[in-house]
């Protein structure tokens, strides 16, 4: 027996009738008529075609604002819209380029309904943050969202894409692709899980994203995991400006704000520093094993609960004074203190071929570029924790990796060394890279054996360089902060540098260079700054 419920007016209607009434009201509110065109193959009335007709038929019983036409692939309309396969449903093609390849069945009925309501209102209904990001897109984006009728997460992602099209119809086009109906495209794009989203044939999202993260991924043409709201103020007044968004900077932000200070983090590049490109982290307490990027995302989300992050802007200079002025590429900060948590950047070998073939087989990031070398032979240069961790990562990815080390013993931790040797990864000992060979891409290496004093040529498809990091001290040098003889920032036990009010934390100070020690130094520095602001040591120095 059909369920009967009492509606607000007191009469009894079935849930289905109640749903249809709600839908009718929603359609009535649409500002414009919507044209739907379905392209089919003559003589092929499959389940997708029938389902599309049926669902559109139901909607049309509720509103006269939807017009529906059906053409076969040999009709001139197919030529006009460049339709070569069927079934394809076009949604209001005079204004929007939205193609549905498959059929709005199962979970996808929700997507079609939301798409119709969005297109019918001509409003994307995006939130302010996502709308601002979409509006900044200034070149064409062809979005492909792979969906399946049984996937409950798919409508969210497909609707994100519809909203983007409605917001910017001149530049954004969309194909919603049902993986059952278009197995050929799913195979071509390697879409083995849904939803999966591509823009201009680049993967921008796996799984359903929030609309802000989707918008950001679409703009940057790469998958984003966290959305950092843009801050437009020209002048920001704080107690502490933290330069660097790695573990030290992020932790100091949390500690500073929790101490009652007003803080801001400025990061010119990617958040997380070296951790973001570390394949796996196995020694951060609380996580037996965690991907570097995942750990960074957790830290960034945590920090964002306390402290604004100004990402993508570089600190250009710091003018001393009370308050100090920190000038970035976008704005000015007025602050009482500055914490330099600028970390370290990867070292290069400095051999011929390295610069020329960078991005053409020479890489400093196995997490980023490893998948491109699956089944191919690569050399990993270095003998420390990073080189061994990354060699193991490549090995597990199916890359034929050989470690090349200039000593006859590794510097890496015992645990990692054992893993490396047990996995059978070959090691070329006492081998120094003299040259990276190849014209337009890496073809091999010239290696000098410092024991036999012989030079040999080894073929390779790629060279990964992981020979340590150099402290990022350009800014410190620019403002006159003293360095240690090793080139790190010189500081006292309270993380005070040689300039009053300027502090340091993390890898830029040298030391153990672990994620946990960087985070610890960030916390220490923030607490020291808090205490110094209550009782400024620089005032005592003046008296
Ligand atoms: P590292 O410990 O400084 O080791 C650098 C390696 O590269 C050394 O084996 C070094 O050889 C070699 N090297 C340096 N310059 C070279 C050159 N020009 N040609 C060839 N080889 C060269 O650097 P890292 O491995 O990047 O580690 C940096 C810091 O992060 C360390 O403190 C490390 O403990 C930490 N880290 C920890 C983990 C972990 O705990 N799982 C993971 C990654 C990094 P020599 O031995 O001859 O000097």
Image (tube, grey):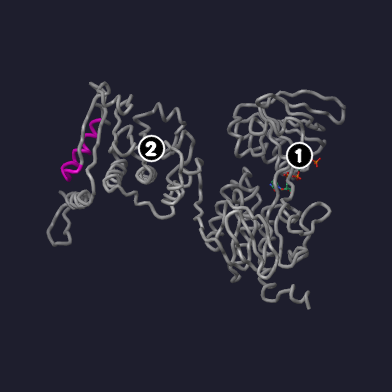
The image position of residue 30, as x and y in percent, is: 23, 49
The residue under label 2 is 173
Give the secondary structure at mark 2.
strand
**Residue 376, how many percent across, how many down?**
63, 26
Mark-to-mark CA distance, 1 and 2? 48 Å
Left or right: 475 in relation to 450: left
Where residue 383 is drawn, which disc sits there? 1
Q: Is residue 160 above or below residue 39?
A: below
Chain part drawn in magenta: 49-65
Extreme-bottom residue of the structure: 543
Count residues near mark 2 (Cα–Cα under 10 Å), then give few for <14, some for 14-19, many for 20+.
many
Kindly tell me whether mark 1's CB lies below 8 Å from ligand 1.
yes
Label 2 beta carbon within 8 A of ligand 1: no
Number of marks in picture? 2
Queried whether the magenta region covers residue 132, the answer comes back as: no
Which quadrant, please, contains the C terminus? bottom right
> In the visual, does 409 lie left or right of 166?
right
On the picture, is 58 further left or further right than 191? left
Q: Badge 1: how crowded within 10 Å, few (<14), some, or many (20+)?
A: many
What label does residue 258 carry, if any? Answer: none
Dot placed on the residue nearer the N-terminal end, 1 or 2: 2
Q: Quadrant of residue 250?
A: bottom right
């Amino acid at each position: 027996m059909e369920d009967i419920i009492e509606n607000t007016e007191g009469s009894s209607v079935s849930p289905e009738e109640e749903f249809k009434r709600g839908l009718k009201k929603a359609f009535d509110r649409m500002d414009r008529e919507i044209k739907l065109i379905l392209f089919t193959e003559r003589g092929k009335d499959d389940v997708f075609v029938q389902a599309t007709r049926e669902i559109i038929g139901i909607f049309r019983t509720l509103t006269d604002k939807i017009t529906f036409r059906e053409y076969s692939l040999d009709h001139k309309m197919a030529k006009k819209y460049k339709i070569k396969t069927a079934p394809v449903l076009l949604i209001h093609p005079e204004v929007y380029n939205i193609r549905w390849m498959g059929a709005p069945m199962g979970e996808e009925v929700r997507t079609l309904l939301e798409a119709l309501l969005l297109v019918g209102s001509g409003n994307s209904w995006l939130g302010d943050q996502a709308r601002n990001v979409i509006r900044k897109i200034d070149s064409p984006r062809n979005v492909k969202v792979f969906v399946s009728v049984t996937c409950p997460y798919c409508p969210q992602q497909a609707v994100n894409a519809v909203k983007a099209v409605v917001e910017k119809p001149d530049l954004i086009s969309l194909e919603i692709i049902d993986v059952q109906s278009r197995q050929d495209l799913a195979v071509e794009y390697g879409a083995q899980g849904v939803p999966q989203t591509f823009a201009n044939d680049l993967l921008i999202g796996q799984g359903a994203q929030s609309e802000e993260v989707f918008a950001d991924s679409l703009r940057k043409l790469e998958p984003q995991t966290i959305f950092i709201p843009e801050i437009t103020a020209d002048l920001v007044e704080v107690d502490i400006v933290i330069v660097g968004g790695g573990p030290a900077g992020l932790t100091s932000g949390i500690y500073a704000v929790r101490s009652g200070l007003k803080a801001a983090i400025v990061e010119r590049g990617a958040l997380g520093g070296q951790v973001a490109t570390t394949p796996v982290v196995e020694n951060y307490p609380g996580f037996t094993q965690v991907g570097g990027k995942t750990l960074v995302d957790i830290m960034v989300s945590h920090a964002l609960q306390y402290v604004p992050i100004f990402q993508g802007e570089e600190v250009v200079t710091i003018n001393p004074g009370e308050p100090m002025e920190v000038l970035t590429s976008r704005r000015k900060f007025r602050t009482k203190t500055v914490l330099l948590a600028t970390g370290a950047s990867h070292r290069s070998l400095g051999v011929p071929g390295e610069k020329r073939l960078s991005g053409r087989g020479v890489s400093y990031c196995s997490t980023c570029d490893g998948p491109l070398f699956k089944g191919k032979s690569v050399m990993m240069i270095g003998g420390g924790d990073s080189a061994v961790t990354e060699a193991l990562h490549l090995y597990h990815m199916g890359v034929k990796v050989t470690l090349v080390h200039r000593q006859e013993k590794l510097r890496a931790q015992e645990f990692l060394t054992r893993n490396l040797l047990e996995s059978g990864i070959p090691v070329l000992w006492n081998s120094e890279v003299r040259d990276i060979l190849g014209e337009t891409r890496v073809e091999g290496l010239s290696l000098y054996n410092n024991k036999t004093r012989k030079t040999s040529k080894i073929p390779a498809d790629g060279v990964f360089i992981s020979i340590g990091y150099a402290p990022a001290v350009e800014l410190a040098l620019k403002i006159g902060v003293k360095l240690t003889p090793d080139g790190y920032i010189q500081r006292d036990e309270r993380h005070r540098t040689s300039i009053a009010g300027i502090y340091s934390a993390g890898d830029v100070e040298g030391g153990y260079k672990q994620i946990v020690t960087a985070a610890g130094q960030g916390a220490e520095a923030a607490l020291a700054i808090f205490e110094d602001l209550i009782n400024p040591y620089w005032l005592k120095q003046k008296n």
